[in-house]
Image (tube, rainbow, N blue to C red):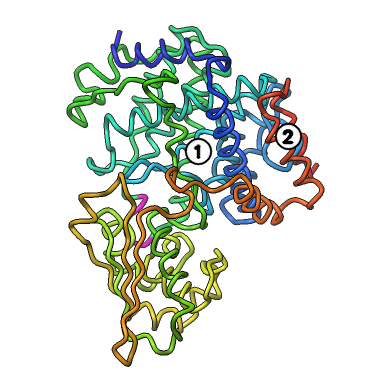
Amino acid sequence: MDSSIARIAEYAHALEFRALPADVVHECKRRVIDAVGCGLGAYHDVPSRVARELAARAETPQGARVYGSKRRRLPELAAFANGVMNRYLDGNDTYPGGGGHPSDTIAPVLAAADAVHASGATAIAAIVLAYEVYHGFFQAACMRDHGLDHVFYTAVASAVGAGKVLGLTREQMTNAIALAVTSNIALHATRRGNLSMWKGCAAGNAARNGVFAALMAAGGITGPDHAIDGPHGLGELVKGFALEPFADGTARPYRLTESNIKFFLSEYHSQAPITAALQLRPQLAVEDIASVTINTYWFAWHEIGSEPEKWHPTNRETADHSLPFIVAGVLIDGRFSDELFSDARLQDQRIHQLADKIAVQEDPAFTKRFPAFIPCRMDIVLTDGTRKTATLDYPRGHHKNPMTDDEVVAKFRELSARALAADRADRLLDRLWALDTLADTGELFDAMVFES
């Protein structure tokens, strides 16, 4: 048996809710609140509607529910639909530097939990486990460095998290992992150039595949014996695959607590530049700006500030990954709202004209400090030669500059209001904060039913 897969399966079998520290449970609930809020915020967007329609093609009494509906769908398709909604606005948490969005594992775990009426404590343990596995794969194999997409981590971690909820045996868990590893290598083309809707749907697809791998393993389907460590396995593809030790609650903290929640609904590496722009905006008049220089680390420059498409985006998916467009919009508006990515604002020539005055450049010193720091320096030169500068190391929401519970709730309320009435959002929020005490995770879905 593959030694890496055996290690994961053993850890998954051993991890129990009662061993989790109280602060880890609390941080888990914060991330569930954040992910569900992002999902409800995206409820009316086109990819969300299409995902729900696809899930609605099959109904089963043993299924799971899609946000807003009381009907039970195939668990893997519920995971897909809810996963697309959670991810589409690009507002959920992240591991910077190619680590993607670990909260993409929340929808598949909750789908599995809803299908089998698992307790909230079981769901929390499975989510913490999924984050642990997700981070472990990110550290062992940065898929982006090989032209591959980070949703691979989502697929494998979702299989483990869903498998935990489904009560897979060690042998079944090894098969679920092997199936997920072998069949979910995705291309990084998803996140380059002029971006498509698939950018916001790829993680939902990976979540679906993870749940399906767990269901296949539960039914008796076996996976390759050496999907990671053997010939033609993952380790051979990425070279030097080696899992770090998993969390033990003492010497090694749970990796969930190290994910960074987004304060703004925008690509993570734009969070610090948005903050810098907001700090400088009261000090100047937009019409007086001669030039803006954003000094950042290589990853941010390469990901959201190097391609020509990033100066004049034509769709939401590219715009929320376009640093010059985002900063120009923030400087003009004096605030940030994801309304900036609407069709109307994409046609706003004031934004495009100011974006042409913005340069993004790598600062090698910042690159050396990343990812321990998320450094940014913004220099704005006015037409009279005056220079305005703002510098910061950690944007709000970084685990070293965390959002307060009140801020997490405020974000949830703002986003959930796009789909839920205020009183229903309040009931859902009460259940989310009480997730660890719920006898049936399905109470979360009960609280957000507003469609037949």
**Residue drawn where x is 45% and y is 7% of the image:** 170
- Is residue 310 inside the magenta stretch? no
For the residue marked with disc 1, what is the amino acid?
Ser
Between disc 2 and disc 1, the foreground one is 2
Residue 254 placement, left or right of 116: left
Q: Which residue is mark 1?
A: 103
- Where are the magenta residues, as a range? 190-194
Residue 17: x %, y % from top left: 57, 17
For the residue marked with disc 2, what is the amino acid?
Arg
- Position of 314 relative to 132 (above/below): below
Residue 12 placement, left or right of 446: left
Q: CA distance from mark 2 to mark 1?
A: 18 Å
> Magenta-highlighted stretch: main secondary structure?
loop
Residue 237: x %, y % from top left: 21, 30
Residue 46: x %, y % from top left: 59, 56
* Quadrant in the picture for residue 317: bottom left
Residue 49 visible? The answer is no
Of 408 and 42, nearer the camera is 408
Q: Which residue is mark 2?
A: 431
SS at circle 1: helix
Q: Residue furthest bottom?
A: 384
SS at circle 2: helix
**Residue drawn where x is 24% and y is 66% of the image:** 361
- Position of 74 relative to 41 (above/below): above
Q: Earlier in the sequence, mark 2 or mark 1?
A: 1
Graded by Cα atoms within 10 Å as few (under 14), some (14 to 19) or many (20 or more), the crowding at tag 2 reads many
Circles 2 and 1, Cβ within 8 Å, touching? The answer is no
Of 173 and 224, nearer the camera is 173
Q: Work out which quarter of the rendered image holds the C terminus and state it.
A: top right
Residue 423 visible? The answer is yes
